[in-house]
Amino acid sequence: MKISARNVLSGKVVEVIAGAVTSHVRIDVGGTIITAAITNEAVEDLALKAGDEACAIIKSSDVMVGK
Amino acid sequence: MKISARNVLSGKVVEVIAGAVTSHVRIDVGGTIITAAITNEAVEDLALKAGDEACAIIKSSDVMVGK
Amino acid sequence: MKISARNVLSGKVVEVIAGAVTSHVRIDVGGTIITAAITNEAVEDLALKAGDEACAIIKSSDVMVGK
Amino acid sequence: MKISARNVLSGKVVEVIAGAVTSHVRIDVGGTIITAAITNEAVEDLALKAGDEACAIIKSSDVMVGK
Amino acid sequence: MKISARNVLSGKVVEVIAGAVTSHVRIDVGGTIITAAITNEAVEDLALKAGDEACAIIKSSDVMVGK
Amino acid sequence: MKISARNVLSGKVVEVIAGAVTSHVRIDVGGTIITAAITNEAVEDLALKAGDEACAIIKSSDVMVGK
């Protein structure tokens, strides 16, 4: 499935930190660590664990710029 | 100013593509290109241009994971 | 590719309305019309047109409730 | 009150799953289940419970398309 | 209709700036100007104009903090 | 650091309500209380507490209008 989000960044899961409701998934994208906050249900659904190949998916309208 | 967003990714602007209302700003973060869609007003306000040092700022709750 | 968003709603594209920068894509999901605003670039990239099978993808944290 | 979001989808609450901080509210919109993640405070404020008539409200810019 | 978003801020429209696709609506909320970017279709749908009583509606998860 | 978000609203933190995973930070902006939901990690990182000068930062595309 192709997706309309402009940022589909391939990388590797380095860590999954489970919380009460949401988990923080840290993905290494070419040396840059990107953190996603997703539901625990989603972590289970995708069977996410450290070492997995995974994409960080971000709509361009959700990226701000700082200078 | 420090910001609560968990992803503040330093990089370099490689391209600013102006549209009718919004501009696409492509930022090279350690070899990964991240695209932001921001208002033309913001581009002017930050005087953004190719070659600038800039950060891509993304809340962790705006990052999805695909596997 | 499976995705962490909790709402992946299968349907059929009924209309693609191109704008200067973004397009409105109307998707019929089981009789309910859901409107997406995506970049013209994404419409081209996915070669979206009326009649296509497509999914409306929405993070649960982006859904508000009104009563 | 009318709202600027393009997707105001009328339906019926089928389930409210309370978490530590946020609740998942599943709304049946014409046979399609849409899941919202809202604060427990909002669930209380709207006195949401299964069987209620309610709307799933989603900005068009928060809907992605997958094909 | 009550809404789950935690920030429903009553104010007065001071300006509607129409763009090619989206309009910027500036709302004076107790002396603070808040800018919304909504579709031109929504401006028409709500018949928004300067002087109108209106609310700026923002989910708490869409508010970042800077210090 | 200047940021592309159109709403950077200076105010004072009136309350930080810690939850299991996220905290609610209430900021008084010229008499208007704006609530942010951010991660507990971000609260620690910014050492946020009642009385602090802080900004509520909101992208214009994340502000809806109700009338």
Image (tube, coloured by chain):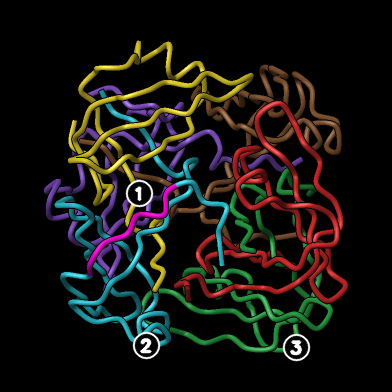
Chain colours: A cyan, B yellow, C red, D green, E brown, F purple
Q: Where residue E6 is drawn, which disc sits there?
A: none
Callout 1: helix, strand or loop? strand
Q: Residue at x 32, y 39 (%)?
A: B33
Image coordinates of residue C37 in percent, x first then y, are 67, 45
Image coordinates of residue B46 in percent, x first then y, are 34, 15
Image check: F37 left or right of C54?
Answer: left
Q: Which residues are magenta?
A: A7-12
Three-letter residue code for mark 1: Arg
Q: Where residue D51 is drawn, which disc sits there?
A: 3
Quadrant for residue E55, please give it. Answer: top right
Instruction: Count neighbours of disc 1 (C-alpha within 10 A) and say few if under 14, some if 14 to 19, many if 20 or more.
Output: many
Image coordinates of residue A65 in percent, x first then y, are 34, 31
Image check: C4 left or right of C13?
Answer: left
- Label 2 and label 1: CA atoms lie apart by 33 Å
Image check: F47 left or right of C36?
Answer: left
Relative vertical location of residue E7 with respect to residue D53 in this rendering, above or below:
above
Quadrant for residue A42, please give it. Answer: bottom left
- For the residues carrying marks 3 and 2, which lies nearer the camera in this image? 2
- For the residues carrying marks 3 and 1, which lies nearer the camera in this image? 3
Three-letter residue code for mark 2: Glu
Callout 2: helix, strand or loop? helix
Image check: B60 left or right of E22?
Answer: left
- Reading the image, the residue beneath label 2 is A44
Three-letter residue code for mark 3: Gly
Residue nearest the observer in this picture, C26 or E25: C26
Q: Residue at x 26, y 69 (%)?
A: A25
- Reading the image, the residue beneath label 1 is F26
